[in-house]
Amino acid sequence: MKLIAQIFLLTIFTVTVTAQAANNTFPQWSPDGRQIVFTSDRDGDPEIYVMNADGSKSVRLTDSKGRDAHPYFSKDGRLILFQSPRANGVDTNIYVMNSDGSDVRKLTDLNGFAGVPVYSPDEKQIALMWRKTNDFRDGAKWLICVMDADGKNLKVITDGKANDQVPNWSRDGKLLIFFSDRSGKNQLYTMKPDGGDVKRFHVSEFNDNAAFWSPDNKRISFVSDRSGRGELYVLDAKSRDPKRLTNTKATERSGVWSPDGKRIVFSSDGDGPAAIFMVDSDGTNLRQITP
């Protein structure tokens, strides 16, 4: 009986350690603000999951070898874009599926690495970033592309002279914001969806990246190393005056606004696995929502 009890306790301890070791990353809101879709390796391989906005009732949506990541809801909540190398285990491409994980369809057939897909506000286009090879030693640059929502008519809209990454649409669909190392540091830029009228959005001496517009188009969330590590900031779109939202010992990743603009969800990693957090848009009420 004593041996059985010891085995039972060991089993509980093992399961607990496994759960704590999971990385939970790339959160994105559902259009109604009730759910968050994200990537987790809690079952041993990075897959797409969805959970309630308070972190409860996680449901696994994908089951494929390779890193399924960067999910993004359609405006009606019926579809989810994501990136995956599932076709050949080498090249990462863009896929779309129903929000329950069914009917997975491949949208691109590119060599290299295509990822971080986001719908335009009218959902007629998808912006993404693409690197033409998987060999990260070859000096190839990240490109920003735009294609039709069905994957047709893909166009490269940056010139490939610098690493241009993580495009996100303004809420009116007139601009894309992205970060680029064209100045020597990662800085925030905007451009039209055809690649024209490129402007530096915010000038700083630090590395700024992963920007998202607020629902009212008046603020920008972004991550910056101006404190010595990656922290979450909000920038007024007119005054360009940044306000720091987090002050942790970890490194924050891409803060995404809730549909009502009241909360920001992000992932954070320090010495341990990445977890998903939420903070009110004024920097108060920071809480962790994944184990």
Image (cartoon, rainbow, N blue to C red):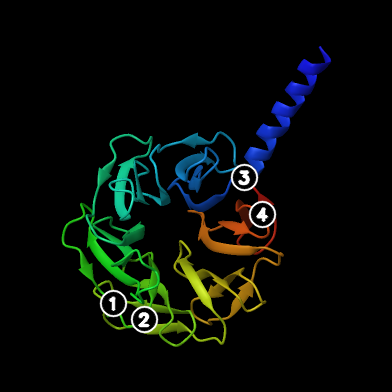
At label 4, the amino acid type is Gly
Between the C-alphas of marks 2 and 3, the distance is: 35 Å
Contact flag, marks 2 and 1 (Cβ < 8 Å): yes
Q: Earlier in the sequence, mark 4 or mark 2?
A: 2
Tell me if mark 2 has few (under 14), some (14-19) or many (20+) residues whose alpha carbon lies within 10 angstroms of its own. some
Tell me if mark 3 has few (under 14), some (14-19) or many (20+) residues whose alpha carbon lies within 10 angstroms of its own. many
**Residue identified by numbered label 1:** 158
What residue appears at the point 48 percent right and 47 percent down from the top-left corner?
Answer: 39
What residue appears at the point 33 percent right and 55 percent down from the top-left corner?
Answer: 92
Q: Earlier in the sequence, mark 1 or mark 3?
A: 1
**Residue identified by numbered label 3:** 290
Tell me if mark 4 has few (under 14), some (14-19) or many (20+) residues whose alpha carbon lies within 10 angstroms of its own. few
Between the C-alphas of marks 1 and 3, the distance is: 36 Å
Which of the two discs, 1 and 4, sits closer to the camera?
Answer: 4
Q: Secondary structure at mark 4?
A: loop
What residue appears at the point 56 percent right and 57 percent down from the top-left corner?
Answer: 266
Q: Nearer the viewer, residue 5 or 117?
A: 5
Q: How many marks?
A: 4
| x and y, in percent, of residue 78 in the image | 34, 41
Which of the two discs, 2 and 1, sits closer to the camera?
Answer: 2
**Residue identified by numbered label 2:** 162
Between the C-alphas of marks 4 and 2, the distance is: 32 Å
Contact flag, marks 1 and 3 (Cβ < 8 Å): no
Instruction: Give the left or right position of residue 282, taking residue 71 as reference.
Output: right
Between the C-alphas of marks 1 and 4, the distance is: 36 Å
Between the C-alphas of marks 4 and 3, the distance is: 14 Å
**Farthest-out residue, right:** 2
Q: Nearer the viewer, residue 132 or 4?
A: 4
Q: Secondary structure at mark 1?
A: loop
**Residue identified by numbered label 4:** 272
| x and y, in percent, of residue 47 in the image | 45, 43
